[in-house]
Each structure stands twice: as C-alpha cells, then as structure tokens.
Amino acid sequence: MKRVIGVIGGRRVSGELLRVAEEVGRLIAERGAVLLCGGLGGVMEAAARGAKASGGLTVGILPQDDRGCANPFIDIPVATGLGMGRNVIIARTGDAFVAIGGEYGTLSEIAFALQLGKPVAGINTWDIEGVMKAESAEEAVRKVVGDFRIED
Amino acid sequence: MKRVIGVIGGRRVSGELLRVAEEVGRLIAERGAVLLCGGLGGVMEAAARGAKASGGLTVGILPQDDRGCANPFIDIPVATGLGMGRNVIIARTGDAFVAIGGEYGTLSEIAFALQLGKPVAGINTWDIEGVMKAESAEEAVRKVVGDFRIED
Amino acid sequence: MKRVIGVIGGRRVSGELLRVAEEVGRLIAERGAVLLCGGLGGVMEAAARGAKASGGLTVGILPQDDRGCANPFIDIPVATGLGMGRNVIIARTGDAFVAIGGEYGTLSEIAFALQLGKPVAGINTWDIEGVMKAESAEEAVRKVVGDFRIED
Amino acid sequence: MKRVIGVIGGRRVSGELLRVAEEVGRLIAERGAVLLCGGLGGVMEAAARGAKASGGLTVGILPQDDRGCANPFIDIPVATGLGMGRNVIIARTGDAFVAIGGEYGTLSEIAFALQLGKPVAGINTWDIEGVMKAESAEEAVRKVVGDFRIED
C-alpha cells in the first residue's frame, strides 16, 4: 500500500506560502506517496497542483456532498457532506502530515493527527507541542517521509 | 473528472454473486470509470479484484479508522472511523451504483443513493422502488454507465 | 437511564399520518420514555408536539449545524451538521423505533435500526423484512415499548 | 430554547481540575442552562455531576455507538459512533464552551468552537488565540454565560 501524506492549511494564505505548498506537493509525489488534502482552494489546491505536476496521485476529502466542489488538481474527490467534520477523516486517512499556515480548521486537523500519534511537520503554522517545525518544503517533507523514494 | 461507480453489497454472499461482483468490477474498469466500494470483503472485495484485473483504479470508504483494514485490491483506502455511518459518504461520492445481494447495510446505501437521485441497478438485491433490476453484470453496468467507454 | 424511542418518517405526509404521529408521541411520553426524532417538520414535528402535550422530553438530531433549525417542540436539539448522515446517529441513539410513512430517508433509518438489531414498528411505511407492521399508534407503541409505563 | 453550555476537557486530569469542572457544571445548571459534554469520564463526568447536583439537565455526545457508555450523570446520551469525530457535533451544538485542562481531543474541540465563532473560556488549558483565560470556575462561567440567570 502506498504511503499517504496529507497537506493541511488555510484557504487564504500568502503567495509565498502557496509556493511552499506547491513545492511540498511536488516533493510528496516525487517520493511516490499519494497526496491527501481537503480538496478545496489555497494550500490544498497549491499542494495538489504541485503533486500533479510531478505525476502524483491526489485525493481530496471534501466538506461538501458534491464531488464537483473539488479543485481541478484532485484525482479522487471524496464527497463527505460532513462540513468541517471531514477533518477527522483526513487525519485518519493520512500516514503523516505537513501543515502550512492555516487557521482554526487547520488547528483541528493538527489536533486530530497528533491525537492519533501521527507525525506532523509545520511551516509557519500553529505552535503546538508535537508539531515538528520546518523552515522549508524540503525540510518538512524530509521530516515526515524521509529522504528516499518510497517504492510502491 | 472520471466517472465513479459504486458497487455495494454484502460481505456474506454466495460464490455465484461473488463472480457477478467481480465481473461488474471488471466492466466498470474497462469503461474507464473508478470503482468505489466500502473497502471490505465479500462483494466489495470481489468487485475491486475485478477492477484491478482490468487495470482500473479502486477506492474503498472504510468504516474503520485504520487504512490497513482495506481488502488488498483497494488502491485508495479512506479511513473514516464512522462505522456504518460511512455508507452516506459512499452514496455521496459515487455517480451511480450497482447493488449485489446484501443485507441491511446495503439497504441503507440504496436508500441514500436514491434519496440523492442517483441511478442504482440491482442484482438479486432489495426490491425497492427506484432500483433498476438487472439479471447480469453486463446489464447492470450498461444501465448505470451506458454502452461505451468513458474517455477520461 | 430512561428508554429512548425514535419516531422516524417523512416531512411530507398526509394529515391522517400526522395525527397518528402525534398520537405516537403522546403515548411514548405517557410511558415515561424520551422521544427521539430528526428534529424537523412533518412526522418529526407531529410526534414531538404529541410528546410535549403529555409532558415528555424530546430530542432532535438535526442534519444542520444550527440548533435553530429544530421544530418548536424539541427540548434538546443536537446540531450534527452531517446532513442525512445524521440518520445513523438516530438509529444508534434510540432503543426502538416507530416508522410512519416516509421516503428514502426513512428507509435508511429503518435499515440502520434493523442492522443494529433494534425493534422497528411500521405504520404505512416501507415493507421491509424485520419491520413489525402496525395499524394504529397504540399498536405500534405497544410493539416497541410494551403495555406498561416505564419507571425511570 | 434553553442555552446550552459545553464543558470540554481531558479524561485524565488532576483532582484539583476535577473540582473546578464540578463547580463549572454546578454554575451552568444554576444559571438555567443545559450542560453539554462528551459524556465520558474525567472533566466530562465531573461537570455533569456538578450540574445534576444543582438539578440541571445534562447531554453527552458519545464517541461510541452504545448509550450505555455514558457516565452516570448524563440524562441524554447521544450515541454517535463517530469516535473523536463527535467533537465537531459538540462544537456545533453548544452556544459557548468552558475548556478545562485537556489534551489533543480538547484542542480539536476548541478549534472547532472558535472556527464557528463561539465563545470559549479556558482554565488551565491550551493557550490558543481566541480562548478567554479564566482563573476560576466562576470567572469562566461568567465569561461565557454572563452574571444572571437565564430564564427559559
């Protein structure tokens, strides 16, 4: 089974953080992992775009009950219809997470991931005990995936 | 966006129905659609095996909170942790459904799919108004997908 | 712990069935049980009105994320924000159920309740194996609660 | 409709914090509000015990699918079967919250409540922007409910 790495973060973040998110998505795909996210805009869309640019597979766990709400870089949109309740499914489905910026929604995802004992690297995000701080996309991905390509 | 066809049905069904489920999975993959199911055994596993044998992509929406519970033919397991509450996510995520055998869990999925106005073909399953009866895998898939290959 | 009896059924039903639902609610409260429902209109509101008229306690499990969506006869509205996904919570929370009329949503609740092995009495509703048919409010409540008042 | 005040917090906290939680529950009931919590042990049980001691009404939103898992001070247990996914229902159902101690689960509830724009007072809990720090049960309840009794 392939590794699944979640990228979590806000819909309204700076252009600089969007570039970081895209790079994180690219690095996840290059390591052969599936990119998991919330399927919407901002950090989620940037990470999915980066993963697709490197030929990766992308999964979006949507709050809405309509798959059409996913951003155009999502291969597999899952229409939960649970609103922000879908955050717990993201935490349960990913093996590890990179958090980038983000507001209270991202905080709930970080909390659930840490409650499940999963690794979370954070770039410019909530300063919560258990989150591994990273200064760059490369450092964050290395912290949650390691240096080497994962074979399928 | 690719079409997503859900196969719903029981974990304990006859060998004959398992062969039908595998054929349904094969036909869905041959038409270029993604196979969606509940990710566990019985009809779900048979359909996923059929889809993989034809090079398809398979998604499993699991009741458990651990991706490792998926059957070995699931490419993308989603660990909802919602128990049978995950049935509503299956109904929301699929474009159309084939129901094969099944007990009360399958009945809840049929009910949700019909409530959402989505096509449901049924083989040897609950006799509910709105379900299109089919006698074979081919007839069922034709009823919900049509005769021709879906281009990506 | 008090018994909790769920009343499930459609939002759009005949005046005759609404009168039956109100009577069911009244009888549930008279037996000292809590009335559980989906918190909205139609059968749900009629049953809650009947229970309140007899001094009962009413709980409504809402699809919306706003308690203000509950009908005025609900004492304890629970705002799930899960849409029709809340149906599974109704099935899990009730000890037994009376189904009155209803469409596909009601069918999903019947399915979940039966999957959990809980008694379901039905008045003019889906003809599903396992549902105990009843001709009147009194017969339905007797079938799921018994003849005598439940002491707290 | 009665005000509903949620008390959130850990299952494993010090005796001192349990005494605070019990006092918070008592004050909530004295002000005529419904006490909402996660229905299990620790802070949840202490708060419910305090509310019952003052004649209040208590609601517990359980992770399990069995009402019998509720602590003995819960009047209305709701069996969600969603695991920690039930935290979002607590946040949606309460009007305001008091957080006491707590670990990652409590953090997810704080995050959801703040995302919904609801008041959260915190006693010895996560230091998150938006949480109103309080030093005592009285201060916390005053911050989220006000000084006066709420009339029904």
Image (cartoon, coloured by chain):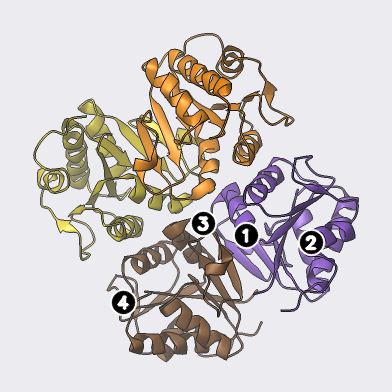
Chain colours: A purple, B brown, C yellow, D orange
Residue where numbered disc 1 is placed: A61
Q: Earlier in the sequence, mark 1 or mark 2?
A: 2
x, y (%) of residue D58? 40, 27
Q: Could you tell me if the residues under marks 4 and 1 are in contact, i.e. CB atoms within 8 Å?
A: no
Q: CA distance from mark 4 to mark 1?
A: 30 Å
Q: Could you tell me if the residues under marks 3 and 4 are in contact, i.e. CB atoms within 8 Å?
A: no
x, y (%) of residue B59? 57, 73
User: Mark 1 belongs to which amino acid?
Assistant: Ile
Q: Looking at the picture, do discs 1 and 2 lie on one chain?
A: yes
User: Mark 2 belongs to which amino acid?
Assistant: Ala
Q: Earlier in the sequence, mark 3 or mark 4?
A: 3
Chain that bears disc 2: A
Residue where numbered disc 3 is placed: B81
Mark 2 Cα shell of 10 Å, populated few (<14), some (14-19), many (≥20) = many
Q: CA distance from mark 3 to mark 4?
A: 27 Å
Q: Which mark is residue B125?
A: 4
Residue where numbered disc 2 is placed: A47
